[in-house]
Image: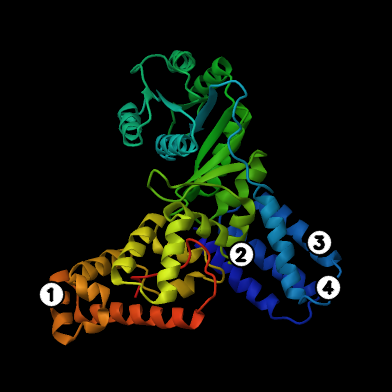
Amino acid sequence: MFEQLSEKLDAVLRNIRGLGKISDKNIRDTSRQIRRVLLEADVHFEVARDFIKRVETKALGVTVTQSVKPGYQFVKILRDEMSSLLGSKSSGITFAKKPPTVILMAGLQGSGKTTTCSKLAKKINDEGKSVMLVAADIYRPAAIDQLKILGKQINIPVYSEGHKDPVKICESAIKEAVAEKIQVVILDTAGRLHVDGEMMQEIEMISAKVNPDETLFVADGMTGQDAVISAKAFSEALQLTGTILTKMDGDARGGAAVSISEVTGVPVKFMGVSEKMDGLEAFDPKRVADRILGMGDVVSLVEKAEKVMDAKQAEKLEEKLKKQSFTLDDYKEQLNQMKNMGPLSQLVGMMPGMNKKMLKGLNLDDRQLIWTEAIINSMTQNERNNPSIIDGSCRSRIAQGSGRTVQEVNQLIKQYFALQKMMKKMGKMKLPAGLNYPIMGAH
């Protein structure tokens, strides 16, 4: 996510951070380079121009703080302006005072709109609100079936009337939701391959009839300025309240994320970060700005950890580590927790200072977690409890049983003892709940 943009900005900022003194020329040269990086990342040219102008104005007029290096002060100005550009503050769903809350989803075909409807439904349902999905895309082949399959997968009802009038389908669905006391209704409307009058007319009619509380535009984050152009067209036809960026786990250059809020005048509310049904994250401008500028996103990392590991488990594990009674079964349990947190590259990318070049030096193949688990499963219970008894012949047997190499078995045992040694040194130091384990299985 934002890898290209982050890597290029890091190269530009590395130079100015190292300067003990910066001049007007330094600021202008750096600003020019940043503008070029933004344009290469497919940021809208007007957005890039205005952004750089604001950064330059603030940087040239700022009073240099004696305790802070001027270069770092410039980076802070850039971070603050980037955060403001992305939308200033996080903005979630605004729920109606009187249910049901009606959410109208709009977007082009291929943007991942139907899948995003399901992800949003799951997210809202997980927060304790009842949700109904509405199959109002009657044109795309298998769109209705797709929504039904996804609804079944997340255990959320899907309202469908087949290929009837989409406007009437939406109206009937809301009446059904009122009767069934459903709190939130998500309307999956039709997408097209491009913006056209017929599509706009239909979605305008739906909007006029159902009067949605939220109208969200779903944009493909990998399409850059195309996403911004189509978002602008939809914002002119509809009263958009926000956007959702999809496919941000792919090779997205970041241009859409940086530009779309400025162009449409509405906040980015969520972004799709994986294909899984729980792969929809709230869009927090400050956190995203930190990711883009290579400052990491520790808050999101902690939140991911908290979702898969409760406080009691964390305390229990911490005690085991302190007493050095941590076994390879505990190690395996941590691997399972990590698999639930998401791809390793994504997790490591949230750590401050980790850029693409650093990640290249690490083998972050998610299969390593599975392979490490296979090695542990091939051990006897006694070996898992006391790895020091594992000799050469045992290692050969474990390697053969797991389908891995003796070298990998050696690496795992070496990691285990290194962890014990580290914890012995840390002694009474308190570890944060949910983050009291290293990245394991990534050799």
Q: Which mark is first along the chain, 4 or 2?
A: 4
Is residue 437 among what the camera can see?
A: no
- Image coordinates of residue 316 in percent, x first then y, are 42, 63
Look at 45% across and 78% down and name the residue there.
Answer: 423
The mark lying in front, picked from 1 and 2, is 1
Q: Is residue 163 left or right of residue 280?
A: left
Q: Quadrant of residue 191?
A: top left
Which of labels 2 and 3 is toward the front?
2
Going from N to C along the chain, the mark reached first, 3 or 1, is: 3
The extreme bottom residue here reads 392
Q: Secondary structure at mark 4?
A: loop
The residue sitting at 44% across, 36% down in the picture is: 113
| Mark 3 residue type | Lys
In the figure, residue 158 lies in which quadrant?
top left
Q: For label 4, count other residues whose C-alpha is less than 10 Å away and answer few (under 14), some (14-19) or many (20+).
A: few
For residue 232, above or below residue 177: below
Q: Which residue is mark 3?
A: 58
Query: Which residue bears the numbered disc 4?
Result: 65
Mark number, residue 264: none
User: How far is disc 1 from disc 2 in space, using C-alphas?
Assistant: 45 Å
Q: Please state which amino acid type lies under the numbered disc 2.
A: Leu
Q: Position of residue 60 (x, y in %)?
A: 83, 66
Disc 3 versus disc 1: distance between alpha carbons?
63 Å
If you read the primary sequence from the N terminus, does the residue marked by circle 2 or circle 3 appear first?
Answer: 3
Query: Mark 1: which amino acid?
Result: Gln
Measuring 37% from the left and 68% from the top, which residue is drawn there? 364
